[in-house]
Structure formats: C-alpha cells, structure tokens
Amino acid sequence: MIRISNGDIYQDISGNKYDAIVCNPPFYQNELKSANSLKNLAHHDNGLLLEDLLPIIKARLTSNGRFYLLLPFKRKNEIESLFRKNLLYSTKKISVRQSVKHDHFRLLIEGKMHEDLPVKEHEISICNESADYTPEFIDLLRDYYLYL
C-alpha cells in the first residue's frame, strides 16, 4: 500500500515512520532575495534548514527506509558533513549538469540510516554538445515530461 503525505515536516506530530521520504528543500543560503516573500520562502533556507531537516528525516524514517534529496551541488561538502553528524549515509549520488559544457549544479541523493558501501556515484548531463537532451536524461524523466 502506498500512502503519500504532503505537509509541513515541522507540523507532523503523528509519530508515524515512513519507508520513503522525498524532499526538495529550499536551496539558497545567504544569497540575493526576491521582492516576493512567498518566492523567498520556497527558494531560501530560512523556512527549512538542512541542519534541521536531517534529524527530522532520521526520526521519521523506518529502520530500512530510504530518503531522497534534491540539493544544490555547491553545498555538497556541507551536506556530507551534516550526514556524518546525523549518522545518515548516502547510497547513491547523481551529480547533474545543464550540459556537458557546464559544471555540476544539482545533486540527487538517495540515503538511509545504515552504511551501504560502496556508494554508487553517477553523473548526468541534461543536454549534449548539440543542445539536445541526453539519452540518460530522457531515460530518467521520460515518464514525467510529455515531449521526451
């Protein structure tokens, strides 16, 4: 059975444990903000800090559960440090770049509460040299995009 909960992670007082937690937390830290306060809440980490999120994930994850995070690549070292501090472990990491000509800009992480070596690391580019979607990108997101 699949049950999906959508809500404020700070407000969940049910005590429920979850087999999977998916989170796309606010990305930006100490960066220029918009004049739109709702946009700032969604994009900047004032509402949900990574250092607060990880202990919440650990408390709400079943012992064999997995969590999935989409994060900015430039915070990779900070994220890895926070994982060590919270005794959480990456099982897969996918570094994402806009094109083969760009640096990485996103990091997809699958993790759990038990170490699972070796960590599977992979890289994906959204576009190739000709600005066409790469086969890896198409395979990954075909079910979510209408025109792939």
Image (cartoon, helix red, strand yellow):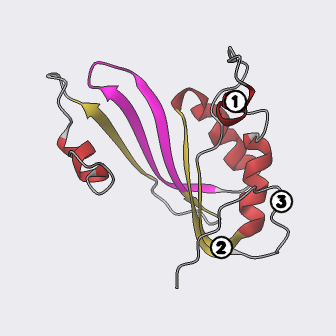
142 to the left or right of 130: right
In the rendered structure, which disc, 2 or 3, sits on the residue that comes first in sequence?
3
Residue 22 on the magenta span: no
Residue in the image at 19% along x and 24% along y: 131
Which of discs 2 and 3 lies nearer the camera? The answer is 3
Q: Check disc 3 and report the residue beneath it.
A: 11
Residue 122: which quarter of the image? top left
Find the magenta span and give its range: 89-110
Residue type (three-letter) at the residue carrying disc 1: His
In the displayed structure, 130 sits above or below 76; it is above
- Residue type (three-letter) at the residue carrying disc 3: Gln
In the displayed structure, 119 sits above or below 6; it is above
* Circle nearer the N terminus (3, 1): 3
- Magenta stretch: includes residue 97: yes
Q: At 73% across and 52% down in the image, what residue appears?
A: 54
| Pair 1/2: label in front | 1
What is the three-letter code of the residue carrying label 2?
A: Tyr
* Label pair 3/1, CB-CB below 8 angstroms: no
Residue to which mark 1 is pinned: 44
Q: Is 57 located above or below residue 125 in the figure?
A: below
Residue drawn at x 65%, y 62% is 6
Closer to the camera, 55 or 148? 148
Which residue in the structure is indicated by mark 2?
18
Would you call the spot at circle 2 few (<14 residues within 10 Å), some (14-19), or many (20 or more)? Answer: some
Q: Where is residue 30 in the image (x, y as percent from the top left)?
A: 73, 19
Q: Residue furthest bottom?
A: 1
Instruction: Give residue 130's position: percent from left, percent from top.
Output: 14, 22
Q: In which quarter of the image is residue 40?
A: top right
Judged by its main secondary structure, the magenta piece is strand
Q: Real-space Cα distance between discs 1 and 2?
A: 26 Å
Instruction: Give the SS element for disc 3.
Output: loop
Q: Is mark 2 on a helix, strand or loop?
A: strand
